[in-house]
Every structure is written in C-alpha cells, then in structure tokens.
Amino acid sequence: MARLLVVHHSPTRSVRALTDAVLAGAGDDALEGVEVVERPALEATADDVLGCDGVVLGTPANFGYMSGALKHFLDSTFLSIGGALGDDGGTGGATGGGDPVSPTVPPAGRGRLPFGLYVHGRYDTEGAVRSVLAITGALPWRRSAEVLAVLGDVGDADLAGAHELGGTIAALAAG
C-alpha cells in the first residue's frame, strides 16, 4: 500500500482548517490503496519520509519565513532523506521546489518523491514559499502540484484547493 506523509505545523485555526482539508482530500473514498500518515512537524522523522511515497508540507508564514517547526523538520532530516548541497553551499544547481532539472539523485530504487506545499499567511506568503522551495530543491523530490498560498481568512475556495492538493499528491503516491 502506498503511503502519503503530511508534515505540518498548524498552530492556528486557519492552518488547521487547511491541514484538515488536505487530509480529507488525501483520504477521499475515490482513492484506493493509500495510507495517509499525519505528523506534526516537530514529531516527523527521516524514517517517516523514507517510508513514504509522497509528501505534503504545510506551514504558516511567520515573519516572511516558514515556521520554525517545519524548518526544524527539514534541518534535522535533510541529509538522511537524500538532501545534497553544491560545493558553494547552494542547492546544487536545483531551480527550487524539486524542479525536474535538479541534479539530486534519489535513493536507490526510488524515483523523485512527489510533494506538495500549502502556506497560510495574514499579509504575505512569498518568503515562506521561497524558503521551503529552496530546501526541497536540494532533495530528491519533485513539486507535483502548484503551491497553495492563502492570504487572510480561509474561504471555501481555499479549502477546496487544499482538498485537491491532498488528493493529487495521494493519487501520485499511489502511482
């Protein structure tokens, strides 16, 4: 059975609503053969990532950056999950967000892991999105859906987008 990992930091009602919608989309009855594993960012491990077939990341935008909790997850697992930096300390030529032109080599026997991202901010999400995509660009992942960036109050269209994001990455994880 395929496994989708949802790693998130959901400290507010708005981010929690998006997380719940992502989980609902990933667990939709129309999708078969996918186990959905939810992990708060401070509890997620490299083993969680290595045992999954797709990842969805969720974070609030805090002062123009991803949450400290999601950053901790990425920092503490980076090398164990196949992260690689170039000689200059950059993402090794990756163009960000798991772009297919990234030279990062996936672990033996695995393709590039599909992933998606959702971000909520009150006033801005650009810095948070940029920071996550900079790190994921150095991982053997491929961004497989448009980033869901939500500003202000979360509306029905935002929840529908989160539901679709979860379902899309789950379907790709299932193959």
Image (cartoon, helix red, strand yellow):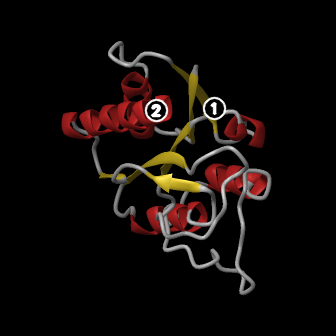
Please give the name of the residue rendered at 60% of the width and 70% of the height, measured from the top-left corner.
103
Q: Position of residue 9 (x, y in %)?
A: 57, 42
**Gap in Å between the C-alphas at discs 1 and 2?**
22 Å
Q: Which residue is mark 1?
A: 39
Q: Which residue is mark 2?
A: 175
- Above or below, 92 against 154 in this view is below
- Above or below, 65 against 41 in this view is below
**Quarter of image, res 154:** top left
Disc 1 to disc 2: CB gap under 8 Å: no
Q: Position of residue 115 (x, y in %)?
A: 49, 47
Lower sequence index among marks 1 and 2: 1
**Quarter of image, res 160:** top left
Front one among 168 and 73: 168
Q: Residue furthest front?
A: 109
Q: Position of residue 114 (x, y in %)?
A: 50, 46
SS at mark 2?
loop
**Quarter of image, res 26:** top left
Front one among 75 and 138: 138
State which mark lies toward you, 1 or 2: 2
Please give the name of the residue rendered at 36% of the width and 49% of the height, measured from the top-left corner.
145
- Above or below, 38 against 92 in this view is above
